[in-house]
Image (cartoon, rainbow, N blue to C red):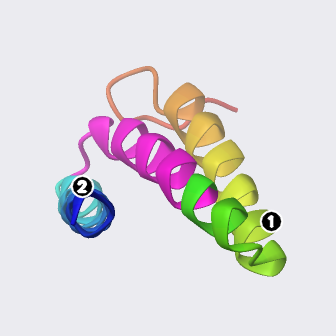
Amino acid sequence: MIFAAFTWLLFALSVAGGVANIRKHRVCFLLWGLTGLGWLTVALSYGIWAQAAREAVFTVLACVGWWSWRHNGEVVT
C-alpha cells in the first residue's frame, strides 16, 4: 500500500510540474527533477533498465531547465 501511495504521489507531482510549465513557473523543473528521481528508483527496483535510463536523462534535463530558467523564465544563452 505504501508503494502504491508513493507512485500516486509521483504521478500528482509530475502533473503539477506539467501545469507549472504551462504557466511558465520555474518550479516545474524542481518537481520534474524530484519525480524523475522517484520514478528512477521505481524502475531500478523492478529492473526496468530502459525506463530507468529515460528517467535519469529526464532528471538531468530538469536540472538543465532549472539552470536555464534562472532569470525569471528567460532562457540564458
Drawn side of residue 40 relative to residue 34, left or right: right
Residue toward you, 59 or 66: 59
Q: The C terminus is located in which quarter?
A: top right
Drawn side of residue 62 relative to residue 13, left or right: right
Please state the extent of the stretch shown in magenta in the rendering.
24-40
Q: Amino acid at mark 1?
A: Ala
76 versus 71 height, above or below: below
Drawn side of residue 53 relative to residue 76, left or right: right
Q: Is residue 35 magenta?
A: yes
Query: Separation of disc 2 and disc 1 at Cα?
Result: 20 Å
Which residue appears farthest toward the front when viewing the image?
A: 1
How many labels were placed on the picture?
Answer: 2
Residue toward you, 51 or 46: 46
- Callout 2 secondary element: helix
Secondary structure mainly formed by the magenta segment? helix
Drawn side of residue 53 relative to residue 11, left or right: right
Q: Is residue 72 magenta?
A: no
The reply to whether callout 2 and callout 1 are in contact (CB within 8 Å) is no
Q: Residue at x 28, y 57 (%)?
A: 6
Counting from the top left corner in percent of width and height, residue 34 is at 44, 41
Which of the 4 image quarters holds residue 16?
Answer: bottom left
User: Which residue is under mark 1?
Assistant: 53
**Residues packed near mark 2 inside 10 Å, few (<14), some (14 to 19) or many (20 plus):** some
Q: Residue at x 32, y 26 (%)?
A: 72
User: Which residue is under mark 2?
Assistant: 13
Q: Residue at x 71, y 76 (%)?
A: 51
Q: Residue at x 32, y 46 (%)?
A: 28
Q: Amino acid at mark 2?
A: Leu
Counting from the top left corner in percent of width and height, residue 1 is at 21, 66
The mark that comes first in sequence, 2 or 1, is 2
- Callout 1 secondary element: helix
